[in-house]
Image: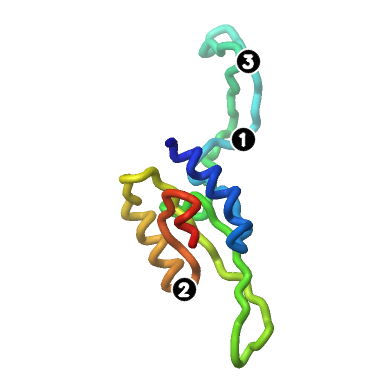
Amino acid sequence: MSERRIQSEIMLALADHGITGWRNNVGTGWAGKNVINITRAGAVQVEPGDVVVRSARPLHAGLCKGSSDLIGLRAVTVTEDMVGEMLAQFVALEVKRPGAKPTQEQRRFIDFVKNAGGFARVVRCAGDLR
């Protein structure tokens, strides 16, 4: 089963575990003034469907390098000194196919979230949310 399909199944199961989650795409793209299908004499030939980005600058998406595929919040009821109050706990889920391992950056992010009191782990199926 593909990682994308595993991820979709996990996304559907999040609510059953009290988690509101979002897909966290990490990467770099380009932003600037989009000019579609320009052709000029002496310029590089632009093919149909190409987009030229003028005054381009990098646009970094996602939380940080190594941040998990799925992030979210789950409600936690605090006991004793804060009886009855609800807090949101940060959730970080790194989706992997069976046998695949997280990168060093992904492992560091998971450890960071856990050490800060969040819920973080590698998941290979919806059952791993338990």
Given the image, on which type of amino acid does mark 1 rest?
A: Gly
Given the image, on which type of amino acid does mark 2 rest?
A: Ala
Horizontal side, residue 106 vs residue 42: left or right: left
Residue 38, numbered circle: 3
Q: Residues within 10 Å of mark 1 (few under 14, many from 20)?
A: few
Q: Are marks 1 and 3 in contact (CB under 8 Å)?
A: no
**Label 1's element?**
strand
**Label 2's element?**
loop
Front residue of 126 and 91: 126
- In percent of width and height, residue 75 lies at 63, 70
Residue 32, numbered circle: 1
C-alpha distance separating marks 1 and 3: 15 Å
Q: Are marks 3 and 2 in contact (CB under 8 Å)?
A: no
Residue under pointer 2: 116
Q: Earlier in the sequence, mark 1 or mark 3?
A: 1
- In percent of width and height, residue 121 lies at 42, 60
Given the image, on which type of amino acid does mark 3 rest?
A: Ile
